[in-house]
Image (spheres, rainbow, N blue to C red):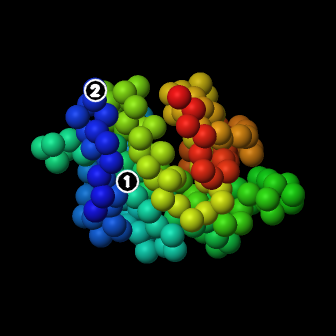
Amino acid sequence: MRSAERPPMTGARIEEWTGGQFGARVDEAMRIYVRAMRYPDHTGVQRAVSARKHVSLSGFACRAAVLDDDTLVGFGYGYTTKPGQWWHDLVRRALDDVAGREWLVNAFELSELHVLPEYQGLGVGRQLLSTLASGLPHTAMLLSTPDSDTRAFRLYRDTGFVDLARNYLFPGDSRPFAVLGARLPLRDGR
């Protein structure tokens, strides 16, 4: 496990986690997901089932923001996106053929990146994203995020993400999402 620099305002350190480490704390991570996304609590339980499966996917990578007392305040993870995966196949249908060939090959799907609300705006999300992206062998990173002017959306724009699809409705969520992509390495954006 490697640690990165500590953000001075939070005291959090960014750790590289294996699939086993993430799996051991996935319930805690999904409580952060629920709070950050403002979902009902039961959504985190359902999402934890998927997250446990994700750790075995090719290219799995995870970073965690942890305080000195071992409290998890943020996390980000993903894997190599491939045909046959739920998100990949839905996004492939949303893109035209050229964009699909350009973006969905040798790409890392950022499945989740979330920070507790009280730690948002302090650079934790940016550190999670940048340390996760810096260790990837892929040529691109893809993600979906609520299609609105949020801190997360602004972070993605700052680091080089561009629109691949807007106002996209994923099954099971009534909010429109933006599907974004960035070439690696990410832009610093500070």
Residue 129 lies left or right of residue 75; in this view the side is: right
Q: Quadrant of the N terminus?
A: bottom left
Relative to the observer, which residue lies in front, 40 or 116?
A: 116
Q: Is label 1 in a helix, a strand or a loop?
A: strand
Which residue is pictured at 37% across the width and 53% down the height? 63
On screen, residue 163 above or below 143? above
* Location of mark 2 (residue): 9
Which residue is pictured at 45% across the width and 37% down the height? 126
The amino acid on which the numbered mark 1 sits, given as a three-letter code, is Arg
Residue 146 lies left or right of residue 124; in this view the side is: right
Residue 26 visible in this rendered orientation of the protein: no
* Separation of residues labelled 2 and 1 (CA atoms): 19 Å
The amino acid on which the numbered mark 2 sits, given as a three-letter code, is Met
Relative to the observer, which residue lies in front, 42 or 120?
A: 120
On screen, residue 48 above or below 153? below
Based on the displayed image, in which of its 4 quarters is residue 31 positioned?
top left
Q: Is label 2 in a helix, a strand or a loop?
A: loop
Judged from this view, the residue extending furthest toward the left is 69
* Location of mark 1 (residue): 63
The image position of residue 176, as x and y in percent, is 64, 37
Which residue is pictured at 86% across the width and 60% down the height? 97
Q: Residues within 10 Å of mark 1 (few under 14, many from 20)?
A: many
